[in-house]
Every structure is written in C-alpha cells, then in structure tokens.
Amino acid sequence: MSRDGAKRPEGPAGPEAGATLAFVESPVQLLNVLEWAYADGGGGPNPEQAAGGAPGGRPSPSAPEGLGAPEGLGTGGLGAAGLTVVVLSPHDPMTRGQLRRMAELARDEGITVRWEDARGGAGAPLKTIGGLRGPLRRAGRIVIGDPFSRYVQLLLTLTRAQDLVVVDDGTATMEFVSQLASGEPLVRWHRRGTGRGAREMVFAPVSATARRRLTPGGDRRVEVFSSMPVEPPAGVTVTANSFAWTRARFGPPRLTRGTDLVGTSLVETGVVDPERYLEAVAALARTHGATRYFAHRRESAEKLHRVAAEIGLEIVRPDLPLELIARRGPIGHTIVSFPSTVVHTLPLALSGTGVKVAVCDVDPAWLRSDASPRAQGFLSGVTGTARDAHRLRSEPAATTS
C-alpha cells in the first residue's frame, strides 16, 4: 500500500492456514492492535495480565495468501510475527487522515497493512468482502477493534478461526464485555430507541452469529485486550493494555505550564445538548486556565469554531490518537477531559511524566431530552472507574439556562 492509502500490488502468497488478521476502522483501534502485538510477542510478554492472562510471545505464522508479504522486518519489529492489518476505511476525512498516519507507523514496525476503501461506493462492500473471503477462512486468529461494527460482524461470519481477540475501541469495550456477559444483543450504548428498526431486524441473524463467534466455547478462545476496567464472562481472557509500546517508542514529553482540554463527540452522537456543552467548556477553561482544546476527530467544524471564537481556546486537530500526541509532547501539566476513553488511557501512556489527568462529570441537565436512557449511567461509570484520573465535579456555570 502506498503512503496515501492506495492499495499496493499484492506480494507473494503466504501459508494457507494459521495466519493472524486484524480488522480496524479507527486510529485508536489500530493503535491498540500495535499495543496488542507488542504485548503478544513483538516486545515481549505483557507483565500486567488478568484472569489468567494471554499467552505472551506466541509465534504467529506469516501473512495469509493474497495479503502481501511483511515489509521492513527487523528483529524487534512487530511484523516479525506475520500480523496483517486490514483497514476498513470510513468516509470521515479526519478519521481517514489519522488512519493513514497510524498505517505508516504500523509499516515502520514491519506490519503488513492492507487498505480497503470498504465504503467507497455501492459495490465496495461486496468487492471488499469477496477479496477477504479466502484469507478469512484460512486465518487461525482474528483481531478486531469494534465488535459493534456491522462490517466486522459480517466478516466474523466468514471465519473459521478459533482464536478471537477484541482490542479496545475506547469505552465501548466496557459495554461489549457487559453485554457479552449478560447475553444481550450487541448494541452501542448511545443508540436511541429499541434497536428494532427495519435495518436492525434484517441484520439481526448476522449480529447473532457474530455474537456466538465472540463467545468462548469448545476450541474457540476469546481474549479481550483492554485498558478499561472490565469484568469478563466465564471463559474470556482479559489482558491488560499498559500502553507499553507507546511508552517505549515516544517521549517522555516536554510539559508546558498550562492546562489542556480534551474535546468529546458527545454532542455529535446526540447525547449532550450543544449549548450546555459549550457552557461547560467555557467554565472549565476559566477555572483551570486552559488555553488549548484538543479536538475529537468527530467534532463538527461549526462547534469547534464556536469554541475558538466564543471561548478563546486554541483548537488543536491531532493527526494521531491523543495518547501518541501527548506522549510526544509538548503537553500541559494538567489535562482535563469529559468522560471518555482518554481518562483511562492517558494516565497509562503518560505514566511517570508528572502529568495530571482530571475528568469532569457530565451533569444530567446537559443531556438531550432524546438521549439514550443508558447514557447517564454509562458516562458515570466511565468517570467512576477511572482509577488514575482526578475527578472533578460539574462546573456550576455550565448548568445554568
């Protein structure tokens, strides 16, 4: 694959069975695949394992047939184990840009990356699935970043792999493990309504099959590689993601004297009222002396313009996941965030740097009237389980009319 994401000519065929395929749709998922590969053998076993841990240093065969040979292998490269990452590229330009940068880092580690414009037109899904059918059936291990993705669920129905690994897709991993343990259908926490629309009903058999694939039993092994506080169901192995690869490759960062705010897509996903969100950001900026606002890749241009024009914060659009941006620096001595993945991951990535991570609760008054009934409980859980982040109360000014 070229540096701009175009598919490269495919290399020599690899062995027909036992390969490891990873499917990612976001930069964070790809980062966590790199972390998993490092813990799994590229950088030695992860010493922080729970529930029995995952076998460290397991050998993986070469890339599967039709996906190309590993590039840039070295004795310390993560690709030495033959991992192939398939990027199911989304439409969003910011996400695509970050994914391309992450793909460069993965190739630098010796990992083979296959870029699929999986949503590039009416015929793209059929073309993508057709091209992956053979490698999927030959793969011995599948790594996924988003078990809620319909695309990934469809691909899971085509694999015979007995080893399945789920790496973090942010806080959604907490919901996935909870639903897996309770036997519930896989539904994203912020989705409104009953999930019984026409499209959901048509896709229900595929989702049910994927859920069975993600349930351990017989010879099928399921591992969750996570930095989130999760309680796995019986038979599921949980391996702790300590961001060891990130800390080994980047930093430590230079610290500034200021405070940085981390943006969230809670407005864009229909959870938080936009006016209340802007009031909360303004109050946090005043209270903590923040000068920079690290935008989430899904935040709208209109909202970010208001953050800059009305609140006076400098907008930073990261070209990599925030864990890598913060680790490279410069970064503020204090980072303030609303409930999100980073209140769990940044303390790990910035361990030993002296940076304080603080999380501000979402006041129930900020929620939209049509927000999912599960929203408040889930967000409170994200905040309450952030073990290494300082907890802030909602700013009073942010709850006024």
Image (cartoon, rainbow, N blue to C red):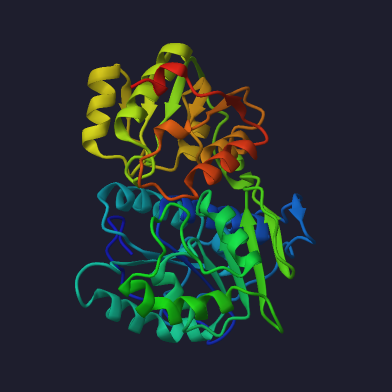
Q: Is residue 183 left or right of residue 126?
A: right
- Quadrant location of residue 60? bottom right
Foreground of the two, 378 or 156:
378
Residue 278, how many percent across, how many down? 33, 26
* Count of numbered tags: 0
Where the C terminus falls, by quadrant?
top left
Where the N terminus falls, by quadrant?
bottom left
Residue at image location 42% in from the left, 80% down from the top: 12
Residue 110, how many percent across, how many down? 50, 60
Q: Is residue 17 left or right of residue 300?
A: right
Foreground of the two, 142 or 44:
142
Can the viewer see residue 64 in this picture?
no
Residue at image location 57% in from the left, 78% down from the top: 213
Is 146 located above or below residue 197 in the figure?
above
Foreground of the two, 5 or 28:
28
Q: Is residue 124 left or right of residue 11?
A: left
Residue 5, how many percent across, how many down? 29, 59
Is 348 located above or below residue 331 in the figure?
below
Residue at image location 22% in from the left, 28% down from the top: 305
Is 123 located above or below residue 145 in the figure?
below
Is 102 located above or below residue 253 in the figure?
below
Residue at image location 26% in from the left, 22% down from the top: 308
